[in-house]
Image: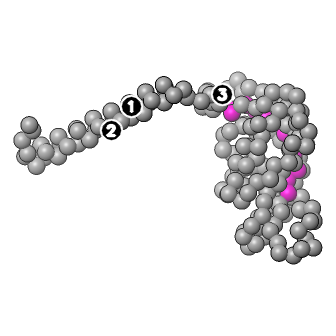
């Protein structure tokens, strides 16, 4: 953390407002370029997201989850958790920012290494009144997990037994 926050941490499903600067650091063997500040592709003072909905760079979403409101953090994201599919954000609003981001991501792929870096300030997080409960932070208890596991096993065994009975009936094998 660059600065520890004092407010609440966001829960999945919350509406989260952030301020960010986005950079892409491309891997290089050139010693003179290793210590250079990576090029920035976008900065936004107010960016609103729904935390945990899969529409944000996964590494950014994971980094936000443990932040506290008012905090500032540098999140260094490996390629696997970065811009790995189209349609995830934050995507620069202007064409110049999108061009920069696409070029830097192409360079990252050509170099076969690098990171996406976000310097993020968590401005606010509020519960989404329209949320229908798809996002939960609570973990399942061991007892509930065992019940769920046993129900799945029983259902699978019943399905297998029914399938075997149907196969036997279709092949005229007597049921004993």
Q: Answer yes or no: do the residues labelled 2 and 1 have beta carbons within 8 Å?
A: no
Where residue 106 sits in the image (x, y, percent)?
75, 68
Residue positioned 66% across, 44% down in the render: 54
Residue at the spot of label 3: 131
Real-space CA distance between mark 1 and mark 3, rounded to the nearest whole angstrom: 30 Å
- Characterize the local packing of mark 2: few (<14), some (14-19) or many (20 or more) Cα atoms within 10 angstroms: few
Please tell me which residue is depicted at 70% across the width and 23% down the height of the picture.
129
- Residue nearer the viewer, 136 or 133: 136
**Badge 3 density bin: few <14, some 14–19, many ≥20, Cα 10 Å:** few
Residue beneath label 2, please? Answer: 156
Q: Is residue 92 visible?
A: no
What residue would you read off at disc 1? Answer: 150
Whether 165 is drawn above or below 127: the answer is below
Could you say which quadrant of the image residue 39 lies in? bottom right
Q: Are marks 3 and 2 in contact (CB under 8 Å)?
A: no
Picture layout, residue 167 above or below residue 112: above
Q: Mark 1 vs mark 3: which is more N-terminal?
A: 3
Viewer-side label of 1, 3:
1
Mark 2 and mark 1: span between their CA atoms?
10 Å
Which residue is rendered at x = 91% and y = 39% of the image? 3
Q: Place residue 115 in its image quadrant.
A: bottom right
Residue interval drawn in magenta: 12-23
Q: CA distance from mark 3 to mark 2?
A: 33 Å
Q: x and y percent of residue 42 in the render?
A: 87, 54
**Does the rendering let one see residue 70?**
yes
Q: How is the image coloured?
A: one colour
């Amino acid at each position: 953390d660059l600065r520890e926050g004092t407010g609440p941490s966001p829960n999945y499903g919350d509406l989260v407002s952030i301020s960010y600067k986005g950079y892409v650091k491309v891997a290089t063997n050139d010693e003179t370029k290793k210590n250079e500040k990576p090029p920035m592709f976008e900065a936004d003072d107010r960016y609103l997201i729904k935390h945990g909905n899969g529409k944000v760079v996964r590494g950014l979403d994971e980094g936000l989850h443990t932040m506290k409101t008012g905090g500032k953090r540098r999140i260094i994201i490996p390629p696997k958790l970065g811009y790995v599919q189209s349609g995830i954000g934050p995507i620069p609003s202007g064409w110049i920012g999108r061009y920069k981001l696409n070029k830097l991501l192409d360079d990252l792929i050509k170099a076969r290494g690098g990171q996406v870096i976000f310097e993020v300030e968590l401005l606010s997080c509020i519960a989404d009144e329209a949320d229908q409960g798809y996002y939960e932070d609570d973990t399942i208890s061991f007892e509930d997990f065992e019940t769920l596991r046993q129900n799945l096993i029983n259902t699978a065994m019943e399905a297998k037994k029914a399938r075997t009975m149907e196969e036997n009936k279709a092949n005229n094998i007597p049921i004993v």
